[in-house]
Image (cartoon, rainbow, N blue to C red):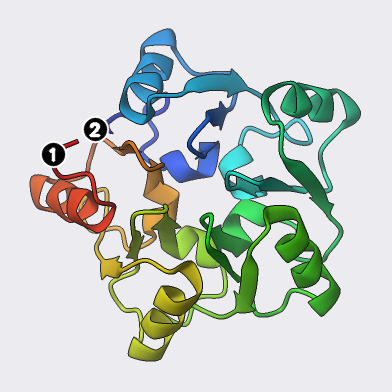
């Protein structure tokens, strides 16, 4: 299922929410009707958290079915809340580029990561998420988590992706990569879409043509 929604009037959902096939984490300032849209579209429960007191949790964490990577801004009480709702491995990233949601694009098969991450950090990501990770850009953009959205069914990415970047994504993430935009032409689709295998949510400004591309890229046709 694919639904349009804004978070308190903001269409950049990927900045404020992160999901896998079991749980969606959101900041604690959403209205109940917005939470219901997330639950219905993604068919999962929702947990409210902050990271370092911040609401931009989609930028500061990423996860797949096996593991989660979260910025080292996370506080003790916030970690307890995360651990109550996520049962996989958790890595608190100790790196200059610690905004995990911005800098890591992952599904259950692989991960594309910011090219300036330390090699030790990349190895820790691989171990935590139980995937192979490769450093790369998308459309020349280092913040790969904002330039694309990935599930186990497909990837939707920035429309200016280069062919070599696309080939690498398909090799590492083991799914087909498609291009598109959200919110009436915004190319940073990772900032505008939150998705799992069962559904997706996108900003209210997303056009019908963009919705069709999202459904096709993420394998949601008929869902």
Q: Total label count?
A: 2
Q: Is residue 136 left or right of residue 163?
A: right
Work out whether 142 lies above or below 4. below
The residue lying toward the viewer, choosing from 65 and 7, is 65
Q: Which residue position is annotated with label 1?
A: 222
Residue drawn at the location 83% of the way across and 49% of the way down: 92
Judged left or right of residue 122, residue 40 is left
Q: Residue at x 75, y 30 (%)?
A: 53
Q: Is residue 160 above or below residue 97?
A: below
Q: Decide: is 75 above or below 12.
A: above
Callouts 1 and 2 close, C-beta under 8 Å:
no
Farthest residue in the top direction?
32
The quadrant in which residue 120 appears is bottom right
Taking the spot 31% from the left edge, 68% from the top edge, the residue there is 176
Q: Which mark is residue 1?
A: 2
Comes first in the chain, label 1 or label 2: 2
Query: Most extreme residue toward the left, as rendered?
Result: 209
Front of the two marks 1 and 2: 1
Q: Quadrant of residue 113?
A: bottom right
Mark 1 surroundings within 10 Å by alpha-carbon count, few (fewer than 14), some (14 through 19), many (20 or more): few
Q: Which mark is residue 92?
A: none
Q: Is residue 183 left or right of residue 8?
A: left
Question: On the rendered image, what quadrant is the C terminus found in?
Answer: top left
Q: Is residue 69 visible?
A: yes
11 or 78, which is in the foreground?
Answer: 78
Q: Residue furthest right?
A: 76
- Label 2: state its secondary structure: loop
Residue at horizontal 39 percent and vertical 60 percent from the top: 188
């Amino acid at each position: 299922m694919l639904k349009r929604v804004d978070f308190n009037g903001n269409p950049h959902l990927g900045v404020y929410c992160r999901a896998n096939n079991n749980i969606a984490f959101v900041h604690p300032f959403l209205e109940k009707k917005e939470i219901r849209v997330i639950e219905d579209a993604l068919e999962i429960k929702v947990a409210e958290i902050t990271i370092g007191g911040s609401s931009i949790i989609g930028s500061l964490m990423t996860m797949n079915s096996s593991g989660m990577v979260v910025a080292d801004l996370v506080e003790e009480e916030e970690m307890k809340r995360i651990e109550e709702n996520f049962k996989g491995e958790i890595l608190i990233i100790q790196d200059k580029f610690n905004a995990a949601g911005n800098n890591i694009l992952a599904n259950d098969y692989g991960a594309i990561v910011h090219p300036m991450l330390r090699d030790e950090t990349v190895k820790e990501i691989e171990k935590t998420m139980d995937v192979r990770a490769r450093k790369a850009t998308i459309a020349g953009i280092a913040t790969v988590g904002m330039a694309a959205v990935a599930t186990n069914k497909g990837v939707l990415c920035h429309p200016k992706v280069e062919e070599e970047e696309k080939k690498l994504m398909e090799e590492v993430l083991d799914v087909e990569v498609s291009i598109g935009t959200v919110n009436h032409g915004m190319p940073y689709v990772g900032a505008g879409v939150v998705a799992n295998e069962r559904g997706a949510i996108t900003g209210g400004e997303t056009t019908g043509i963009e919705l069709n591309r999202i459904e096709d890229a993420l394998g949601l046709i008929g869902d």
